[in-house]
Amino acid sequence: QLQLQESGPRLVKPSETLSLVCTVSGGSITSSSNFWAWIRQPPGKGPEWIGGIHRGGSIYYNPSLKSRVTISIDTSKNQYSLKLTSVSAADTALYYCARPSGHSYASPLDYWGQGSLVTVSS
Amino acid sequence: DIQMTQSPSSLSASVGDRVTITCQASQDISTFLNWYQQKPGTAPNLLIYDASNLQGGVPSRFTGSGSGTHFSLTITSLRPEDVATYYCQQYDNLPPTFGQGTKLEIK
């Protein structure tokens, strides 16, 4: 059974960089899926798709966040990561890693991590 | 970005009721539409993909329909464990976008 787990600091100061890692277990990150994604959900709101990465390294970012986001993959550690720079209170959210099930960045998300609540506050 | 509008935003129904949630896309998305169920304190769970295909392990009382710009999710006989917030999501165009959610409660 594939499992995803987010990890990283839960509190980030304004203007600093948010960093999260998603560890994939129960399967290889290169053979369990072609794509991997990050989604966030502000408190009380609907989810927002942040971006996705192909196992080969190609990436798509949501244009609304593109200037501040970096997603990367480390196949040797079975992990992929998210960095979001210059954060503000508006970036406070539950951050999820998830697996697109099909052949594109945007495919239905069938496996999710439990989520990591990141609060931006001084 | 494609805007997804759900209605109603909240809904209260009795056990055994038939419940329908609708989702409208701001442009034609064919059948590139998913439905997710999110119970409190948990991640969203994929219920239906491609507008009408039931994800494995999802009870058959959940059905999806629609194409183009109008979609619906129906629970044929509501059970207490269906209390959750439901989200539609389009994936015809990047970036994928979600509706604002429909919170379902039991009367």
Image (cartoon, coloured by chain):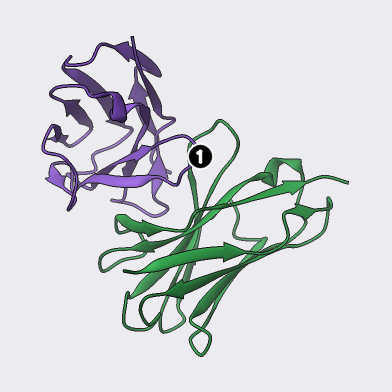
Chain colours: A green, B purple
Q: Chain ID for label 1? A: B
Quarter containing the N terminus of chain B: top left
Place of residue B31 in the rendered image (x, y in percent of width and height, measured from the top left): 17, 44
> Residue A98 at x, y = what percent?
42, 60
Query: Which residue sits furthest right?
Result: A122
Q: Residue at x 22, y 15 (%)?
A: B15
The C terminus of chain B appears in which quarter of the rendering? top left
Please say if B23 is above or below B98: above
Using a 10 Å C-alpha cutoff, classify the residue at mark 1 as few (fewer than 14 neighbours), some (14 to 19) or many (20 or more). Answer: few
Closer-to-camera residue (B18/A104): B18
Name the residue located 53 percent from the left edge and 74 percent from the top edge: A80
The x, y position of residue B63, in whole percent, is 13, 34
Q: In which quarter of the image is residue B20?
A: top left
Q: How many labels does the image show?
A: 1
Horizontal side, residue B73 vs residue A57: left or right? left
Q: Residue furthest bottom?
A: A76
Q: Where is residue B70 in the image (x, y as percent from the top left)?
A: 21, 29
Q: Is mark 1 on a helix, strand or loop?
A: loop
Q: Mark 1 points at which residue?
A: B41
Residue found at x 53% / y 85%: A77
The one nearer the camera, B100 or B75, is B75
The three-letter amino acid code for the residue at tag 1 is Gly
Relative to B43, say whether A85 is above or below. below
Question: As drawn, is A111 to the left or to the right of A48?
Answer: left
